[in-house]
Image (spheres, helix red, strand yellow):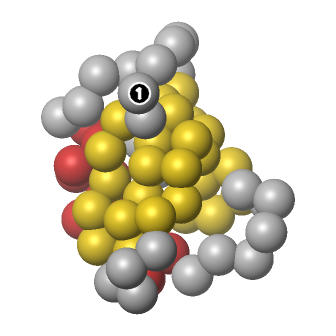
Amino acid sequence: MRYKLPKRITKILISLPESGMGYQQVDFHLTTGKIIKNVTVLNCEELDFDEGFDTTLIEKATIHV
């Protein structure tokens, strides 16, 4: 499924490098303390994720290494 990321997260991702042409592999740190690793984000604004996902819980985003 694809989810639109909040603008505050898009702004963070714009400042981070791409993993490939038009996408980033990202780790999301949630307000619940959970970390969701290696998620594909397209064009800094669309989250490609198989499960249900509440994007309002994203506290921080970092590039997956």
Image quarter (top left, top right, bottom left or bottom right) of the C terminus: top left
Q: Position of residue 21 (x, y in %)?
A: 52, 12
Q: Is residue 46 left or right of residue 53?
A: left
Q: Is residue 44 left or right of residue 61?
A: right
Which residue occupies the foreground of this view, 16 or 38?
Answer: 38
Secondary structure of the residue carrying tag 1 is loop
Q: Position of residue 56 (x, y in %)?
A: 43, 82
Residue sitting at 22 percent across and 51 percent down? 11
Which residue occupies the foreground of this view, 18 or 35?
Answer: 35
> Is any part of residue 9 visible from this angle?
yes
Q: Position of residue 62 (x, y in %)?
A: 31, 45
Q: Which kind of residue does numbered mark 1 sit on?
A: Val
Residue sitting at 37 percent across and 79 percent down? 33
Residue occupying the far top of the picture: 21
Vertical side of 3 occupied by 25: above or below: above
Q: Quadrant of residue 1?
A: bottom right
Residue sitting at 68 percent across and 50 percent down? 48
Q: Position of residue 53 (x, y in %)?
A: 65, 75
Q: Quadrant of residue 40?
A: top right
Q: Is residue 9 left or right of residue 39?
A: left
Q: Mark 1 highlights which residue?
A: 65
Vertical side of 23 occupied by 42: above or below: below
Residue occupying the far bottom of the picture: 32
Residue sitting at 59 percent across and 46 percent down? 39
